[in-house]
Amino acid sequence: MLAKANRITSADDYRVIVRRGAKVAGAHTVSYVRSRESGTDARFGFIVSKKVGTAVRRNLVRRRLKAACHEAVVDGLRGVDVVVRALPGAADAGWPDLRAEVLGALSRRAGGGAGATGMALGPRDVAAASVAASPSSRESASKGA
């Protein structure tokens, strides 16, 4: 469970983060990350619409997203506001998939990786990057050259 200090509760805060935050898109979620003062607690908000499924499915997805974000807080994430929007496919995603996607989006933003430019990274971008980095693609490129 996220502490009150780690939750976004104001509709105005949600609006600002979604409009001005950096967008990191995944297969099951879209995360919006906005920097805050470096010493402040990380805050999280969740958007899980009726398109995700019934109330039971939506709450399951929300609990999984909250648990993944709680792990980030425990690991020391600070100084950011994050809104995670669940896409309809999140209802069918397992816990490891959602966890990896949320933590990956947070690490890309916090670590200044590929998503640090503020451009959205989609599943194709991530897949293309993993294929380009795989040893088999390097071997086939060197054989063809």
Image (spheres, helix red, strand yellow):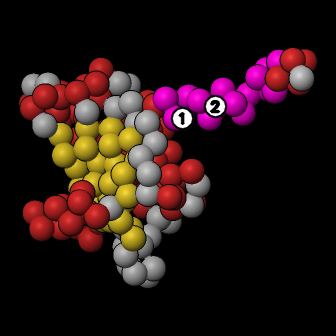
Give the image location of residue 62, x and y in percent.
Answer: 23, 41
Q: Quadrant of residue 41?
A: bottom left
Give the image location of residue 27, x and y in percent.
Answer: 39, 30
User: In the image, is residue 108 above or below residue 135?
Assistant: below
Give the image location of residue 70, x and y in percent.
Answer: 38, 54
Instruction: Say if the magenta span includes residue 61.
Output: no
Instruction: Say whether marks 1 and 2 touch (CB < 8 Å).
Output: yes
Magenta span: 124-140
> In terms of secondary structure, where does tag 2 sit?
helix
Query: In the shown orientation, is residue 60 left or right of residue 41?
Result: left
- Give the residue drawn at x 83%, y 18%: 140
User: In the image, is residue 92 above or below residue 123?
Assistant: above
Q: Which residue is mark 2?
A: 130
Q: Spatial distance from mark 1 to mark 2, Cα to Cα?
A: 6 Å
Query: In the shown orientation, is residue 126 left or right of residue 87?
Result: right
Q: Quadrant of residue 6?
A: bottom left
Instruction: Say if the magenta span includes residue 127.
Output: yes
Query: Magenta segment, principal secondary structure?
Result: helix
User: How many marks can you see?
Assistant: 2
- Give the residue drawn at x 12%, y 68%: 12
Which amino acid, by three-letter code, is at mark 2? Ser
Residue 104 visible to the viewer = yes
Query: In the shown orientation, is residue 115 left or right of residue 7?
Result: right
Q: Which residue is mark 1?
A: 126
Please name whichever residue, 52 or 130, is drawn nearer the observer in this view of the structure: 130
